[in-house]
Image: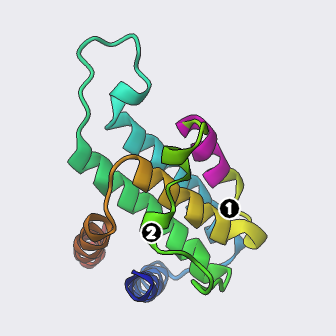
Amino acid sequence: MLEQLKELLEMQRELDNAILKEHGNVYDRNIAEKNKISLLVELGEMMNELPTYFKHWKFTAENNREKALVEYVDALKFELSLFNYYKETVEYMNEYDNYDKLIKSTLKLSEVLLTCIICLSESEVKLSLEWLFNIGNYLGFTWEEIYNTYKKKNAVNYERLKNGY
């Protein structure tokens, strides 16, 4: 898994560079801040695909796991972008399946979503990624699903870039 994570980090670095070049930007604090907001938005979009986790008032709420996975991967893309920007490494990280604190504890999903966002500073971006992995595990996303969806979404993003998105 860690080798695949390194691969995704490199893929994200290449995509970020292509986007920056296309738009005449440089990855700086301003772009990093926008990516933090984007990550927050993607987590919200993911939760909107999982209404049974929070819409207690809606009898007809139904989860769309596939769409939620895509939104999770979108959040991961922004997380990895920040990971690269802050020059963090995957050294000393655990395998994905070891991030199961939400499953094995009394922590609440809302608390972990907030912790993931709060930890987006340069000194805690690795912790934010770990909490994002906890969220993925809790929601039942396997590493294989995440990895494969990430690669598919990366291809979509290059196609969008090519078409002026």
Could you tell me which secondary element the residue under label 2 belongs to? helix
Whether residue 6 appears in magenta in the rendering, the answer is no
Could you say which quadrant of the image residue 25 lies in?
Answer: bottom right
Q: How is the image coloured?
A: rainbow
Q: Earlier in the sequence, mark 2 or mark 1?
A: 2
Q: Is residue 27 visible in this depiction of the protein?
A: no
Q: Is residue 56 left or right of residue 69?
A: right
x, y percentage for residue 78?
A: 50, 66
Name of the residue lying farthest toward the right: 123
Could you tell me which secondary element the residue under label 1 belongs to? loop
| Count of number-bearing discs | 2
Residue in the picture at 45% in, 84% down? 2
x, y percentage for residue 124?
A: 73, 67
Q: Is residue 40 left or right of residue 46?
A: right
x, y percentage for residue 17?
A: 47, 87
Distance from the alpha carbon under mark 2 to that under mark 1:
19 Å
Could you say which quadrant of the image residue 88 lies in?
Answer: bottom right
- Answer few, some or many: residues within 10 Å of disc 2's Cα (few below 14, many 20 plus, some between 14 and 19): some
Could you say which quadrant of the image residue 73 lies in?
Answer: bottom left
Determine whether 14 is above or below 63 in the image: below
Q: Amino acid at mark 1?
A: Leu
Query: On the rendered image, what quadrant is the N terminus found in?
Result: bottom left
Q: Is residue 68 left or right of residue 121?
A: left
Tell which of 142 and 118 is nearer to you: 142
Q: Which residues are magenta?
A: 109-116
Q: Nearer the viewer, mark 2 or mark 1?
A: 2
The residue that disc 2 covers is 96
Q: Main secondary structure of the magenta part?
A: helix
The residue that disc 1 covers is 120
Q: Amino acid at mark 2?
A: Tyr
